[in-house]
Image: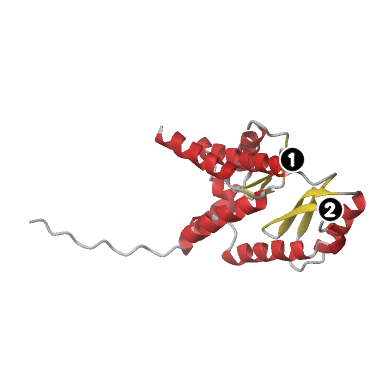
């Protein structure tokens, strides 16, 4: 019961937050960064996480000025794989933006999922944020995969999944996303590796943590 109350409270908070989906994600990431939880469980190295954040910043600056007012473009980088989502007025804008961000050093792959049409209204983006939060909550509730290994984002009801996972984890994440209420379609951008590799990455992260100090002795009186 307590867990359900906490989940509902978290969802309500996300929906109530003003602004765009990107703003919600920044707020969530800021909180996570403060606690160090996300970084501790991320299968990417700290250096790669920093590179991904830098790539997103650079990509935003690579959007040509003529599209700044007519396009709604989001960039999500994970393990140097760049996903482009949002809406642009025409095919030319879609192609030009992709061409520009491909020039960014260190980007291995680009996935251009821009839609053609007017920018979505705030109400649509708020609903997308709500869908994202529901998918994340259901990943946690599944108890089959760490939600920290999956990056979820939603545009126009389309859920995009990113992360470094093995085949079993990918199937779980896709099944959870596609059966979540409000999801129109799931786009799989997951980087699937072998179970030995995910095990190695997890052990590498765990091994990087400092050994906790020994507990002080207790004397009973």
Q: Earlier in the sequence, mark 2 or mark 1?
A: 2
Answer whether residue 159 is visible to the viewer in this image. no
Q: Is residue 11 found left or right of 122 in the rendered image? A: left
Q: Is residue 115 above or below residue 208?
A: above
Q: Which residue is mark 2?
A: 70
In this view, the residue in front, 150 or 33, is 33
In this view, the residue in front, 6 or 111, is 6
**Helix, strand, or loop for circle 2?**
loop
Residue at 69%, 34% (x, y): give it: 183
Q: Is residue 138 found left or right of 62 in the rendered image? A: left
Which residue is the extreme one toward the right? 92
Numbered circle sitting on residue 205: none
In this view, the residue in front, 131 or 82, is 131
Q: Which residue is mark 1?
A: 156
Q: Position of residue 19 (x, y in %)?
A: 65, 50
Residue at 85%, 57% (x, y): give it: 67
Q: Position of residue 140 (x, y in %)?
A: 52, 40
């Amino acid at each position: 019961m307590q867990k359900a109350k906490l989940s509902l409270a978290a969802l309500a908070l996300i929906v109530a937050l003003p602004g765009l989906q990107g703003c919600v994600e920044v707020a969530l990431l800021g909180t996570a960064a403060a606690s160090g939880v996300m970084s501790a469980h991320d299968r990417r190295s700290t250096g790669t996480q920093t590179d991904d954040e830098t790539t997103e910043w650079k990509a935003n600056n690579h959007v040509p000025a003529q599209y700044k007012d007519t396009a709604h473009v989001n960039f999500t980088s994970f393990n140097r794989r760049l996903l482009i989502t949002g809406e642009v007025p025409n095919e030319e804008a879609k192609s030009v933006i992709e061409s520009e961000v491909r020039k960014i050093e260190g980007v291995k792959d680009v996935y251009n999922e821009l839609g053609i049409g007017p920018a979505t209204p705030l109400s649509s983006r708020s609903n997308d944020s709500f869908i994202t939060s529901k998918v994340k909550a259901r990943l946690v509730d599944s108890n089959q995969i760490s939600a920290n290994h999956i990056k979820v984002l939603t545009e126009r009801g389309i859920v995009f999944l990113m992360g470094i996972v093995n085949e079993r984890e990918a199937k779980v994440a896709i099944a959870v996303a596609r059966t979540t209420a409000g999801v129109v379609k799931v786009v799989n951008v997951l980087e699937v590796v072998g179970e030995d590799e995910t095990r190695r990455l997890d052990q590498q992260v765990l091994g990087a943590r400092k050994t906790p100090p020994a507990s002080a002795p207790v004397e009973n009186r």
